[in-house]
Structure formats: C-alpha cells, structure tokens
Image (cartoon, rainbow, N blue to C red):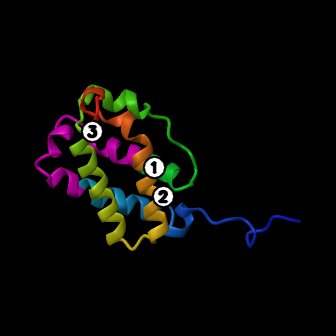
Amino acid sequence: MTVTSETTPVSHYQRIGGASSVKAAVELFYDRVLADPELAGYFTDVDMTGQRRHLALMLTVVLGGPNEYTGRGLAEAHQPMNIPVAHYAKVGAHLTEVLTQLGVPADVLAHVRTVLGEVQDQVVATGNRPGA
C-alpha cells in the first residue's frame, strides 16, 4: 500500500490549523495568565516574547506538529519556581479554556488534558505534590 495524504493520519496540530492557531492560543493564554493575580508574579522578570515562543513550540509538539523545541526540560525550568499544584491546575484551566474558546475539538482537548496530567510532576515542586 502506498501512503498518500488520504491515508496519512492528520495530526491534532494540523486539525486545529497549524502554527497560526497555536500562536493565537498562546497569545490568548498568556493574556489570561498575566491578568491572573495568582499567576502573574511567576512572569515578572521573564522575557515574554521568548516565553510565548517556547510555549508555542512545546504546544506544537504536544499536538503532533514539527518538533523544533530546543529549550530546557520542564523539570529544569520549573522546579526552582516552587510551583504548588493549585497554580499548576489554574494554568491548565486557562489553557483548556482558551482552546475551548478557539473551538478546538473535544478529543484534542482531552489529549491536552492527558499531557498536562502526565507532566504535572515535572512542573509542580516536589514538596507541593499531594501526598509529598
């Protein structure tokens, strides 16, 4: 069997509209996070242009798009920030609300939620995890 565009599965990334849709989601996401008084402080001294670019590259990978991310790993970038699980949950909620607002299909949202669950321990500080 020859693999053609008809037989190649379409990635979540392609289904939601590719790079322009990811960029739009990241812009709306950080607008929300920076307006959230519980979360804004994490970004006080952060280069937000670079931060937005990093998240766009990571979200692209999560959605099955091209992997061009070369930044630090999640644990390396987040563990020093001592993030509690409640703040991680708020960030995840902002992301899924933005994706919902943009009309992302339910199965793609479910995939994003699954990934958020899988990487939580890399982001949430060790002492801030339930049962820790």
Q: Nearer the viewer, residue 91 or 77?
A: 91
Question: Does residue 48 belong to the magenta stretch?
Answer: yes
Report which quarter residue 27 is drawn in. Answer: bottom left
Q: Nearer the viewer, residue 79 or 118?
A: 118
* Farthest-out residue, front: 131
Query: Which segment is the magenta one?
Result: 31-55
Image quarter (top left, top right, bottom left or bottom right) of the C terminus: top left
Relative image position of residue 78 (x, y in whole percent): 32, 32
Helix, strand, or loop for circle 2?
A: helix
Characterize the local packing of mark 2: few (<14), some (14-19) or many (20 or more) Cα atoms within 10 angstroms. some
Left or right: where does residue 39 sit relative to residue 8? left
Helix, strand, or loop for circle 1?
A: helix
Q: Amino acid at mark 3?
A: Asp
Residue behind mark 2:
111
Left or right: where does residue 82 sit relative to residue 95? left
Helix, strand, or loop for circle 3?
A: loop
Left or right: where does residue 19 sit relative to residue 40? right
Residue behind mark 3:
47
* Residue visible at 33% across and 42% down in the picture: 51
Q: Amino acid at mark 1?
A: Val
Mark 2 vs 3, N-terminal side: 3
Cβ–Cβ under 8 Å for marks 2 and 1: yes
Label 2 and label 1: CA atoms lie apart by 6 Å
Residue behind mark 1:
115
- Circle nearer the viewer, 1 or 3: 1
Label 1 and label 3: CA atoms lie apart by 25 Å
